Image: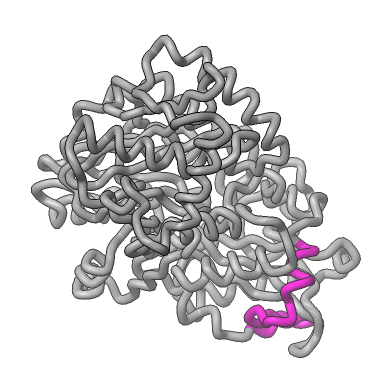
């Protein structure tokens, strides 16, 4: 069976040939991404038949990158067996159109619900245009650089040296003060940037810095694969006017002068940040690279349209008018803590939280086959009073159930009724095997699960686990 291990910089020389032979152009399939997000996303890898198989954790389960190497078909066979042995969902991320079509042609998969999230699509630019900013459409960038030049003199950029790291750290400390309202994702990205800085040479990264007032005011870190420059990190002190476009063009020019001209620059995604999206569009991308996610053989795309009688309540699909109620449910910390969820530490919440964000993310999860979410209502036209989720749908047919209610609807038997109906639906309609877990101290949840007919099966230091016996 496949044996995965956590990626570290020590694995660079083994993994690098496979990543550098990749032709998708996705920033996720680079050494810089593996290093920056290796710990946060639990990136793991193994080699099978001279083929790299890697994964990262998305929604609490592994999502595999497309196998890269001589035997992708054999690697897929091995992954199917691995998912069966480990009782995992079979999920893939960072697929392009051709990869999705290959999976759809595979007779083993009845369902390939592939979708992409615009927040994680890479922006690709002309390398030549980035090195010159010629033409009317780049007048804004030239104006910013001209302003920088008037205020601080002709831009002075050079390759970063190890002796620069203390000065870079001092700059980052000032950067942190300028961005004191960082999101959890921004905080993780900053930690990843620091990690890259300490392993630049080992990871074959290119780093350049911009000097003004005898100090480092900006730096960029990137990686060259084929004819594309990937820019993994770009930090600058915004107190220096025009510093970002100046750093960007200077970095591209340094790469051109040192390694020769390339064709493309990948500035990665915008994480859904409106300001960052506007900025990336202003640099005139020539295309965006969409990365598809799929949960193979998931029942979610069809199941989400069913209505389930759970007297004295009813389970229905989500409705547009549920947006506000769902926002309140997700931001109720007392309710959500029993799911092990805290919206304030959710890396997927990349923009300002409003009443749309949780609803939209859940619809996305249902579209890509990762979950089936039902609203609990007192009547079919009533307001949402809680939620039932079917998720962690493994290749072997196991389906995990979660249930939560607004506090004012707890203690009325609604949770037991909804959970019991979900158990029956999974068994009799989806023909899958229901299971559940709860925190050991959550006595009410344990009673609800047992009342549904599931039985205690095991425990660890945190949870009790339940299944059919």
Q: Is residue 322 magenta?
A: yes
Residue at image position (16%, 41%) is 48
**In this rendering, position of residue 147 left or right of residue 182:** left
Residue at image position (39%, 13%) is 162
In the rendered image, which quarter is residue 44 located in? top left
Residue at image position (40%, 61%) is 284
In the rendered image, the residue lying farthest to the front is 150
**In this rendering, position of residue 249 left or right of residue 333:** left
Q: Is residue 437 magenta?
A: no
Note whether residue 3 is visible.
Answer: no
Q: How many marks?
A: 0
**In this rendering, position of residue 410 left or right of residue 95:** right
Q: Position of residue 435 (x, y in %)?
A: 55, 58
Residue at image position (32%, 48%) is 132
Residue 52, compared with residue 218, is above or below; it is below
First to last magenta residue range? 308-329
């Amino acid at each position: 069976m496949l044996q995965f291990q956590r990626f570290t910089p020590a694995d660079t020389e083994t993994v690098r040939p496979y990543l550098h032979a990749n032709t998708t152009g996705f920033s996720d399939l680079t050494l810089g991404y593996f290093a920056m997000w290796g710990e946060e996303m639990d990136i793991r890898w193994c080699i099978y038949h001279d083929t790299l198989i890697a994964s990262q954790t998305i929604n609490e389960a592994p999502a595999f990158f497309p196998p890269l190497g001589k035997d992708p078909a054999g690697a897929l066979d091995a992954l199917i067996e691995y998912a069966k042995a480990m009782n995992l969902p079979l999920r893939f991320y960072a697929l392009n159109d051709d990869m999705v079509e290959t999976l759809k042609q595979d007779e083993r998969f009845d369902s390939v619900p592939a979708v992409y999230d615009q927040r994680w699509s890479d922006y690709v630019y002309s390398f030549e245009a980035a090195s010159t900013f010629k033409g009317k459409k780049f007048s804004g960038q030239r104006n910013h650089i001209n302003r920088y030049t008037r205020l601080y003199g002709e831009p002075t950029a050079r390759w970063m040296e190890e002796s620069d790291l203390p000065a870079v750290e001092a700059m980052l400390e000032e950067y942190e003060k300028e961005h004191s309202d960082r999101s959890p994702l921004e905080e993780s990205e900053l930690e990843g940037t620091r990690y890259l800085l300490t392993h630049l040479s080992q990871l074959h990264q290119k780093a350049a810095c911009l000097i003004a007032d005898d100090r480092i005011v900006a730096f960029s870190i990137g990686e060259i694969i084929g004819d594309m420059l990937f820019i993994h990190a770009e930090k600058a002190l915004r107190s220096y006017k025009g510093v970002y476009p100046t750093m960007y063009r200077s970095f591209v020019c340094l790469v051109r002068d040192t390694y020769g001209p390339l064709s493309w620059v990948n500035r990665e995604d915008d994480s859904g940040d409106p300001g960052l999206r506007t900025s990336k569009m202003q640099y005139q991308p020539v295309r965006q690279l969409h990365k598809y996610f799929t949960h193979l053989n998931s029942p979610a795309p069809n199941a989400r349209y069913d209505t389930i009688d759970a007297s004295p309540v009813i389970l229905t699909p989500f409705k547009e008018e549920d947006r506000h109620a769902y926002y309140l449910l997700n931001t109720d910390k007392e309710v959500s803590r029993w799911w092990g969820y805290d919206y304030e530490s959710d890396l997927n919440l990349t923009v300002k939280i409003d009443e749309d964000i949780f609803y939209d993310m859940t619809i996305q999860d249902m579209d890509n086959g990762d979950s089936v979410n039902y609203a609990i209502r007192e009547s079919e036209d009533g307001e949402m009073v809680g939620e039932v989720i079917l998720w962690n749908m493994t290749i072997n047919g196991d389906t995990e159930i979660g249930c939560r209610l607004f506090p004012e609807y707890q203690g009325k038997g609604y949770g037991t009724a909804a959970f019991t109906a979900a158990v029956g639906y999974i068994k009799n309609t989806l023909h899958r095997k229901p299971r559940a877990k709860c925190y050991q101290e959550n006595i009410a949840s344990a009673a609800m699960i047992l009342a549904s007919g599931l039985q205690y099966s095991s425990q660890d230091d945190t949870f009790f686990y339940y299944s059919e016996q």
